[in-house]
Amino acid sequence: MSWLELSLDTTHEAVDWVYTLLSETIDINDVYITEYAESDAANSHWTFTMRLYLPYDISARTGVEKITSLLSPLHRTGMTTAIQTNVVEKKITDAPQPRLYPIGERFIIVNSDTPAESEIADKITLKLQKTLAFGSGLHPATILSLRLLERYIVPNMQVLDFGSGSGILSVAIAKLGANVLALDNDHVAVQATQQTVSLNNVEPQVKVMQGSLGCGSNLGHWMGGNTVNNVPQIEAEDTFDVIVANIFSRVHIALADDFRRALRHHQAQPGLLITAGFTTDHEESVTTALTEAGFEVIDCERLNEWVALAHRCQLKKPDFPQHI
């Protein structure tokens, strides 16, 4: 049988988007990712090569047009190359796959099929399989979130992972010894989170739910996809020690007051909010909204244009003059 191979080179942040955009079109287990192989890879804009395969038959042309259309926003914004096509007799499925991704000082991300002997003894291992949800661990926003989490999470904390996506942050929090409510308004993300939690054997510490916090239920699908209906609303007050939200800036801004209400306010340990999922273009608007809600920035991590911030609850919400 002949196959039509579609290949494209991507940046780090494009990988999750390719999986997400194609999730309703093809089986993502048939998408193969390898390290970018050009000789000047160290100085290249590209990090990975992704390949997917369609049966080379009468419907192949239609399939290529649909996939090209779905991925065109990534190409326009410089996150991928244009799709290249080639007729092959065999899928390239046995190329070396990226297996170990060191993140921060304490974590490594491994594929679900990585042999146990490949793991590093003094690192916290986060196992991840291919998923339809945003957050594979390759995205800079996820990397930055993990860097902040390893600094601030301590055993027995109560933590909300808001917009849990693939579940990687929930697993990391649990493996640092805390208890987690993993919350997402997308049913695919909820399933992916549950699978990742089970894969990493942290079920006793992680509760996975479909829903939102406060007014988040009125924002539709956080990823900008189909409208989400009948999502449970979680009313939390003085419930969590830490909230981590790796999600779009508009959601951070809309939920600023809800985040503060959901965090515990204690002199010895004021609540902590970790925000990520946005670039420096949106940093000021996010920081302004959270400052007005009673937070102060205490730490940050940056990777290229991506930023993650740690905010501490001020014990008394500041009074701002009314706008005239």
Image (cartoon, grey):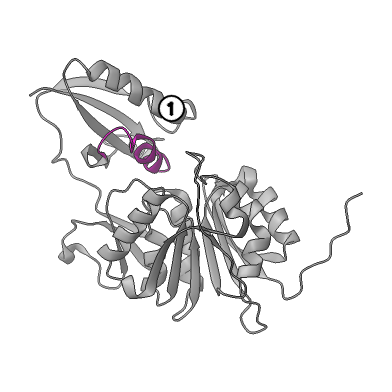
Query: What residue is shown at x 49% (from left), y 30% (from top)?
Result: 77
Residue ranking furthest to the right: 324
Where residue 208 sits in the image (x, y, percent)?
40, 64
Furthest residue to the left?
Answer: 1
Of the 4 image quadrants, the one containing the N terminus is: top left
* Front in this rendered view, residue 252 or 303: 252
Q: Please, is residue 43 above or below residue 136 in the view?
A: above
Number of residue marks: 1
Residue 304 to residue 10: above or below = below
Which amino acid lies under the numbered mark 1 shown in the image of this protein?
His
Q: Which residue is drawn at 40% across and 39% down?
A: 17
Horizontal and vertical percent for residue 120? 25, 67
Coordinates of residue 162 in the picture (x, y in percent): 50, 60
Q: Residue 26: within the magenta? A: yes
- Extreme residue in the front direction: 230
Q: In the image, which residues are magenta? A: 12-27
Q: Relative to residue 171, is residue 153 drawn left or right? A: right
Q: Is residue 157 left or right of residue 190?
A: right
Residue topped by disc 1: 75
Could you say which quadrant of the image residue 240 lies in? Answer: bottom right
- Residue 47, image x, y percentages: 35, 40
47 to 87, vertically: above or below: below
Residue that sits furthest to the bottom in the current view: 268
Q: Nearer the viewer, residue 20 or 175?
A: 20
- Check disc 1 and report its element: helix, strand or loop: helix
Q: How crowded is mark 1: few (under 14 residues within 10 Å), some or many (20 or more)?
A: some
Tell me, yes or no, if residue 105 can be seen here. Answer: no
- Magenta-drawn stretch contains 274: no
Q: What residue is at 23 percent from the left and 39 percent from the top?
A: 32
Does residue 157 appear in this view?
yes
Residue at position x 34%, y 45% from top? Answer: 132
